[in-house]
């Protein structure tokens, strides 16, 4: 276990995201990944019907994931996270197909969109801390030919990523400007998380 981590047991990550796992690993935070049994789409649909915006949806999903896994391991610190993408009044989900990815890129081309990254930390079925951070990304105007070449290059990764890109990879070719913390763009705002962990004595300060 990392010398920076002061808890007896590793953090529980309520997610199967390889990107979030890589961020925690790079920050020397020991963790175990355990997927949350949460119907994300049903919860999201209900929240949207109630008028929730992208920030509220991301935060609610992060909290629900953290609570679901925390209840199964009451003594463990549990981290849930989620990310939503909005462009104007429209919210975007993972495209799920090449055609969906192309449609997403067409809608975002030449426009500014926002990534809202939320996290929640729970223990014993109680939320200890939560936060949402937002990054703003300006996508350049994309030609149809470039979109096809880009989708050929990234393959199925575009189908499984909100916005049809991974900005830390070939997706960087899509942008004119990116404003926001790197970890927020990747879906797990580490700086506020680490600040809370330090303040509570969970990591070395």
Image (cartoon, grey):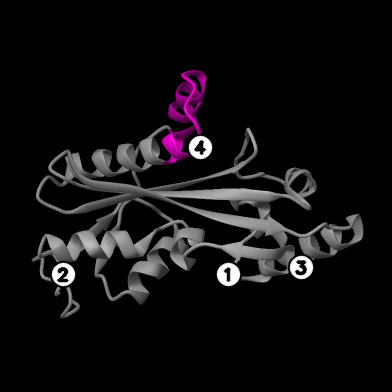
Measured Cα–Cα span from mark 3 to mark 2:
40 Å
Asked if residue 52 lies in the magenta stretch, the reply is yes
Q: Earlier in the sequence, mark 2 or mark 4?
A: 4
Asked if residue 51 lies in the magenta stretch, the reply is yes
Q: In this rendering, which labeled residue sits more in front, label 1 or label 4?
A: 4
Mainly helix, strand or loop, the magenta region? Answer: helix
- Residue 132: percent from the left, percent from the top? 39, 48
Q: Earlier in the sequence, mark 3 or mark 2?
A: 3
Secondary element type, mark 4: helix
Residue on which disc 1 sits: 168
Measured Cα–Cα span from mark 3 to mark 1:
14 Å
Residue found farthest to the top: 50
Residue on which disc 2 sits: 203
Q: Nearer the viewer, residue 120 or 136?
A: 136
**Which mark is drawn over residue 54?**
4
Magenta residues? Answer: 40-58
**Which mark is drawn over residue 182?**
none
């Amino acid at each position: 276990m990392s010398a920076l981590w002061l808890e007896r047991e590793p953090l529980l990550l309520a997610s199967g995201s390889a990107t979030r796992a890589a961020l925690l690993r790079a920050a020397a935070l020991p963790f175990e990944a355990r997927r949350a049994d949460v119907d994300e789409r049903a919860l999201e649909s209900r929240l949207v019907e109630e008028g929730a915006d992208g920030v509220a949806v991301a935060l609610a999903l992060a909290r629900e994931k953290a609570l679901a896994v925390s209840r199964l391991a009451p003594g463990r610190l549990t981290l849930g996270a989620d990310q939503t993408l909005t462009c104007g009044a429209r919210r975007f989900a993972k495209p799920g197909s090449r055609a969906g990815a192309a449609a997403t890129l067409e809608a975002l081309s030449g426009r500014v969109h926002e990534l809202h990254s939320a996290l929640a930390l729970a223990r014993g079925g109680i939320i200890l801390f939560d936060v949402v951070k937002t990054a703003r990304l300006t996508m350049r105007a994309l030609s149809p030919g470039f979109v096809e070449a880009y989708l050929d290059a990234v393959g199925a990764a575009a189908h499984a990523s909100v916005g049809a890109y991974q900005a830390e990879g070939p997706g960087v070719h899509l942008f004119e400007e990116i404003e926001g913390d790197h970890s927020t763009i990747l879906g797990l705002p580490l700086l506020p998380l680490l600040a809370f962990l330090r303040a509570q004595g969970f990591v070395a300060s």
